[in-house]
Image (cartoon, helix red, strand yellow):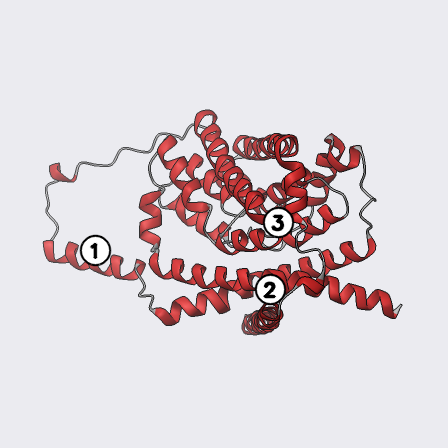
Amino acid sequence: MVEIITDLFWNTWSLVAVMAPYLLIGFAIAGLLHGLLRADFIDRFLGKPGLGGVVNASLFGVPMPLCSCSVIPIAASLRKSGASRGATASFMSSTPQTGIDSIMATYSLLGGAFTLVRVVVAFICGIVTGYLIELFCREKPKPAVPDMANLSFSPSTDAVDTASTDCCSATKPKRDWRECLRYGFVTLPGDLAGALLFGLFLAGLITTFITGDLLQDSMSSGPLAFLFATLISLPLYVCATASIPMAYALIAAGLSPGAALVFLITGPATNTATIVTVWKMLGRKATAIYLLSLLVISWLAGALFNASLSTELSAMAMHHDAHDHTTAGEHISGILLTGLLLFTFVRSRKKQEKSCCCS
């Protein structure tokens, strides 16, 4: 029993230590992006109808450090601000799959080639999903806007200028370096802490109790493997970052990299909250297109992945297979990351309890 607990601890800790330096760097870059990007800029960037808006939404969504639930209020804001159905769906499809923190963490455990493929597939998912919705879910024509030039009265220029200034000042909050640090190392880790800690612990359990020859033959790389990856990802709420150690552990248990890619695509982008949001904002037909597009693209990508790169990537993905290979710097980073996640997790729980008591 003691040996099992020891193995569980070291298997979990090795994943934490290996991911920690890259994840901390990802948090820092996410804070910088938060300071550079403004909400009004996002609204203009995604407001174009047609393929242009869809491509922009996917291009913008891939590096955004937003998990499956964090993306919901932003997508709703974009939709209200004039973004088309396709652009909104593209953003909701590509954004939860990746993020700068997730990209760094994927590289730490699964290597550069796997990381590149994951980013490219997320980008393609956003474009295909959004454009199909643009084609088959036409927007209702907007009511005609009255021609203000033909009206008999003229509003005061000073009043218009004042309203415009107040509106702009309300939508452009000033973000200094302290706000960037707060978002990168307090807000974002707080959003991810619970799911990431759970994902790391679950990955440690899989690594400890599931042997490398458990998933063999058809359950390793065939259609059954893809079905297995899809079925375990659909009911789970896993963000893009928390799903990485779980995918790593599944590969260690014998699952093919292609099936692991299916898990990384469908898990973050198809949780219940996202599906309900897509249904409410975009409608039933768009929701069906959204789900089918993600499933078909993930399976095709997984099959191509196994056919072309599985051998190379299996070796690359397992280059951190033992805690003995971790360096002193990785252990120190792991301690910092663990402390940060625990602190932000407790802090967010206290804030939730306080808000519940006040309400």
Q: Position of residue 183 (x, y in %)?
A: 45, 65
Q: Position of residue 162 (x, y in %)?
A: 17, 60
Secondary structure beneath dot 1 equals helix
Q: Choose the circle earlier in sequence order: 1 or 2.
A: 1
Q: Choose the circle earlier in sequence order: 3 or 2.
A: 3
Residue carrying label 3: 110
Asked if residue 53 is positioned above or below residue 23 in the image, the reply reads: above
Residue carrying label 1: 164
**CA gap, disc 1 and disc 3:** 49 Å
Q: At label 3, which amino acid type do we have?
A: Leu
**Residue 196 visible in the picture:** yes
As drawn, the residue found furthest toward the top would be: 136
* Residue at the spot 71% in from the left edge and 64% down from the top edge: 324
Are the residues flagged by discs 3 and 2 in contact, CB closer than 8 Å? no
Asked if residue 154 is positioned above or below residue 202 in the image, the reply reads: above
Q: At label 2, which amino acid type do we have?
A: Ala
Q: At label 1, which amino acid type do we have?
A: Ser
Secondary structure beneath dot 2 equals helix
330, 164: nearer the viewer: 330
Q: Position of residue 317 (x, y in %)?
A: 65, 48
Please identify the quadrant where the N terminus is shown.
bottom right
Left or right: where 56 falls relative to 152 = right
Residue carrying label 2: 193
